[in-house]
Amino acid sequence: MRTFKLYAALVGAGLRGEAQYRGNLLVMLVAGMAYQGIGLAFVWVVVDRFGAIGGWTLGEVFFLYALRLTAHGLWVVPFSQLNQLDLVVREGEFDRYLVRPLNPLVQVLTRRVGLMQAGDLVGGLLLLAYATTIVDVDWSPGAVGFLLLAVVGGALVEVAVQLGLSGLTFRLLSTRMLRIQVDSVFGTFGNYPLKIFPSVARFLFTIVLPMAFVAYFPASVLLDRTGELAVPSWFAYGSPLVGAALFTLAYLFWSRQTSHYTSSGH
Amino acid sequence: MTVVRAHDLVKEFRRPKRFTGAFGGLRTLLTRQYTTTRAVDGVSFDIEAGELVGYLGPNGAGKSTTIKMLTGILVPTSGQVEVAGVVPWKERERNARHIGVVFGQRSQLWWDLPLRDSFRLIGKLYDVPREQYHPNLERFTELLDMADFLDTPVRQLSLGQRMRGDLAAAMLYNPRILYLDEPTIGLDVVAKERMRAFVAELNRDEGTTVILTTHDLDDVERLCSRIVLIDHGRVLYDGEVAALKARYAPYREVMVHLAHPDEATAVEVPHAERARAEDGKVWLRFDPETVQVADVIAAVLARHQVSDLAIIEPELEGVIHQIYAQRSVISARE
């Protein structure tokens, strides 16, 4: 409870700080949405050319894309500062977070507010709202509930991977490129139905990089396509839980890695 | 009561071995060989509540590394450390409530916000109750003369103003122990003096234990009664400043400016030797154990006309310089 209050206070401070640069604020928001718009245009061109991908209609792929983007937007907004962890660790800024009575991760995450990332979330939510109207799904309370859980679970899966990798920063000092690469794998392949990939890739994207849990599995459940999955259907229904479990593991790993922090200078 | 206890503290840093020459960069990247440096090599000391200790050493001696282990930032390679009954790196959040930390080279204030906002956030972070927060802020604002820039964004503050802000932020929650790492670096004379006066007052009035690392020996002369001197990660000296001076600079000097410059070489005083003579000035060196200042001066005045006169105390700087040059361990408090 105390942590949440402090989190809110620090985010508030971050926002007031960003508000000092109003021009930047607006440009960042627009840039974030434009960047995602290009991604969507690409998917649209592909589907438009081929009519459907792996049996998924344009509307269904669109829904998958929106689900992925919303989950992505949901974690990149609060976790945007994970991107700066290399800098925070290498330049010794992390010192400060270790001598204050608050979880160091919370302090890293609130050092600034991710505005460009807010563009991802807003874009994702708008698309998702639209996508739910063009797919053939009966939006019963259960379906809506699963959709919400799936978005949160998907966000947790992605953030778990990023958090786990960033934990290595305390030893390796630089993991930014690694994280960007992994994020771009999620952003590139996560927008398509997994079944169009060869089986090796399907295995990799399910077990090694648990990308399938972000959007593909939950979308299969909602679109009633679990029958075509290579895994049992309870696997797909359980995706939100997978997110929660992976996130817990990643957080524990990250916390343990902080003891390898070497600060800067002597 | 002992508040800070360090016993046989060691910190080693391990880095991949560096290669030079053809493909050196690649070999450095792939090697499994490591070089280990021992930044702190078996440091022990106890600090009592209310002490004001100077922790000194040349660049790279291991000062900051020790401070980082005391504050819980670094995990020691071996040895024990305990601060106010807490092992800092094991219980960081509990430890954080006992300590205030000022890093001279790095601010803890919120860059884009008015100074007042940083104080408010620090107050929240440390759960400072209202009835403690307001009197503290008022008092520090007055002592550090911050009223004029409380509402200025931190990025627009001068270095001296920012350091005052940092010092106030570190003390807002009345920690028992204050670590100051180079607090006066880059400050002008007036700003330095204001910082020192504030630290001295906190130490005197609230009994705050202060551990100070600095390269400015004026800070030490002004504030510290005890110093711990380290080099190459080992303690060279731990004891009183006065005792160190007595040991390394047992002599005092009297400088006399003669009215008749040509008499300079003729000045003879029993138990004092002529250390230097130039431009009609003579420096007489004597051991205060065998002869008193008054007698030396009287002896000079009896035979010569003197236009000016000064008694020169040994400076800590010269003493420390000697010790670094010798680099030998002095057994403490003998």
Image: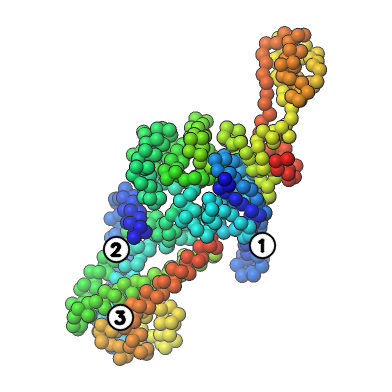
Instruction: Tell me what residue is drawn at x 69 percent, y 36 percent.
Output: B244
Marks 3/1: CA–CA distance? 49 Å
Circle 1: residue type = Thr
Label 2 vs 3, first from the N-terminus: 2
Circle 3: residue type = Pro
Provide the chain ID for the residue under circle 3.
A
Q: Residue A119: give its label.
A: 2
Could you tell me residue A213's position as x and y percent? 36, 79
Residue carrying label 1: B35
Q: Secondary structure at mark 1?
A: strand
Residue carrying label 3: A218
Closest to the camera, between mark 2 and mark 1, is 1
Circle 2: residue type = Gly
Could you tell me residue B112's position as x and y percent? 36, 47
| Residue furthest out toward the bottom | A227
Q: Nearer the viewer, residue A87 or B241?
A: B241
Left or right: A94, with B139 as reference point: right
Question: Pointer 2: residues within 10 angstroms few (<14), some, or many (20+)?
Answer: many
